[in-house]
Amino acid sequence: MHPLRCVLQVQRLSAPFTSMCWVLLRTCRAQSSVSSTPCPSPEAKSSEAQKDFSSRLATGPTFQHFLRSASVPQEKPSSPEVEDPPPYLSGDELLGRQRKVYLETYGCQMNVNDTEIAWSILQKSGYLRTSNLQEADVILLVTCSIREKAEQTIWNRLHQLKVLKTKRPRSRVPLRIGILGCMAERLKGEILNREKMVDLLAGPDAYRDLPRLLAVVESGQQAANVLLSLDETYADIMPVQTSPSATSAFVSIMRGCDNMCSYCIVPFTRGRERSRPVASILDEVRKLSEQGLKEVTLLGQNVNSFRDNSEVQFNNAGSANLSRGFTTNYKPKQGGLRFSHLLDQVSRIDPEMRIRFTSPHPKDFPDEVLQLIRERHNICKQIHLPAQSGSSRVLDAMRRGYSREAYVALVHHVRETIPGVSLSSDFITGFCGETEDDHRQTVSLLREVQYNTGFLFAYSMRQKTRAYHRLKDDVPEEVKLRRLEELITVFREEASKANKTSVGCSQLVLVEGFSKRSTTDLCGRNDANLKVIFPDAEVEDITNPGLKVRAQPGDYVLVKITSASSQTLKGHILCRTTMKDSLTYCTT
């Protein structure tokens, strides 16, 4: 086979090669635009181009290089071998040489976890991390695209950073600025063309490529890798916890989403669903337990649709059971270890470690998951059930796969199965075609369910989504904002009522640190993930009778609740305890 044909056939399988070609193209254009020498004849240019291409082809990646890149992915070892550098870069060029990186995170918990993954990769390449923007050599923004406001925040931030870059002293190495995550994936080259100060783009599946991208940038070129992957889960990369006093951590268990709700950009910025091997997740949780962390949150765009296909013996299992009355936008998926199995195994690692998970889809709550949450004392009795709307008509337009009636039935079933469970939800107001009657149905759902926590937003149409192509964003902005204010008001009223049922009860609280508003108060979170504020005082340690202690971050304490609002509980501390011992004393 002709070598050129080989390269063309495998080009789309290799992210480094694709990015290299893109960089080379920009380099050629840049050189041609500044050249002052006379243009050679077409014949000479053709001959010269052929020689140049042949030379680069001879010294560049071989066919075997791409075969390795495109091989069927296997479960990655916990301690992977260091990969060889790309053929067009030396190993030294991939080293950070102790340049300082400043990471700034926007958006969801997944982006927080992605920041830790990106930093783990860069740290191994010799970069240092700084919390001082002024001393940074590389500034990386981990971005969100879920709404227009989130993207506008990044554009505004780039304008601020432009001043920092233009005023950079020539005695220092040039300041490099990169956009990571969903916004890089959604807008791609538009960012580089609109903001010339941006040096690199890396999509959510391209963080392993950061050392190479930064090496290319050091040559004076812009660089990008925004290819989505069908298998990248970063299973072999242990995220670096950046806060030494942290009491909790996020553990990513799956990436991407297949639900294709008509309003949502996530499938287009984070790709198809793929899950980490169970073994790698359990290994990460064990390490976090050994480090003394007391809480982990299992993360995923659709966390409870988890399906690990890495163990062949489970690939003949049937499709997962859905919540009653719910449907999917895709064909049932066969085989694999499911979320209930993972949740069971994670909860057994450390009985003194709290387990949470987010963000789930209401369709993926079969009885086995609910039963497990009820039975295990260290799985928090708090469930996020994103409703999005209280109108069946709007839910159908959103392609959510359920009606209002099915959703309410699920809420009742959850509360019957898990007594005292805390519920939270997401709502979008002003979706395409939403009428005043649709809005009133959403208001009535908020009153009927009485959520403890809520996340409410006005609809923001996103390009590429089904709604963008097939529906009309016909609710005026002022109407969206008015409806949003009404939803927020109702939510706060109902959440206050729900949270006031805790007054007089003793609750287990995981101490996080001092309150932001007072150095004499401590704050933490209860099982329902509500913030609890209480005075810092000496109390008895139940495990050491007679010993007086002051609670520290990472301690479990019993707090008697004395007041409640829609977002916060207040009380006074009773004692320091353990999760196991608290079962005797907690009254909720």
Image: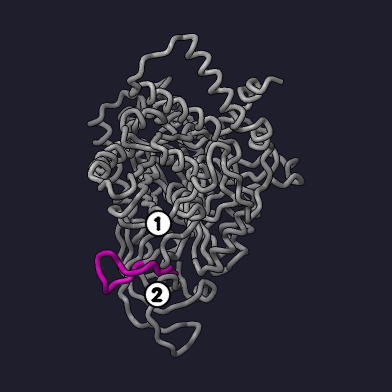
Q: Is residue 103 visible?
A: yes
Residue corresponding to mark 2: 552
Residue corresponding to mark 1: 129
Q: Residue at x 50, y 52 (%)?
A: 125
Q: Which mark is residue 173?
A: none
Residue 187 or residue 70, whichever sits in front: 70
Q: Residue at x 32, y 31 (%)?
A: 430
Q: Label 1 amino acid?
A: Arg
**Which secondary structure dominates the residues rendered in magenta?**
strand
- In this rendering, the count of numbered labels is 2
N-terminal of the pair, mark 2 or mark 1, is 1
- Picture layout, residue 30 above or below residue 110: above
Residue 583 or residue 177, whichever sits in front: 177
Residue 514 falls within the magenta-colored stretch: yes
Q: Quadrant of residue 393?
A: top left
- Picture layout, residue 118 above or below residue 43: below
Task: Estimate the x, y position of residue 553 in percent, counting from the top left.
Answer: 40, 71
Span highlighted in magenta in the image = 507-523
Q: Quadrant of the C terminus?
A: bottom left
Query: 10 Å neighbourhood of mark 1: few (<14), some, or many (≥20)?
Result: some
Task: Estimate the x, y position of residue 530 in percent, counting from the top left.
Answer: 38, 60
Task: Estimate the x, y position of residue 381 in percent, counting from the top left.
Answer: 50, 58
Residue 281 or residue 545, whichever sits in front: 281
Q: CA distance from mark 2 to mark 1?
A: 27 Å
In the structure shown, which secondary structural element does the residue marked by tag 2 occupy?
loop
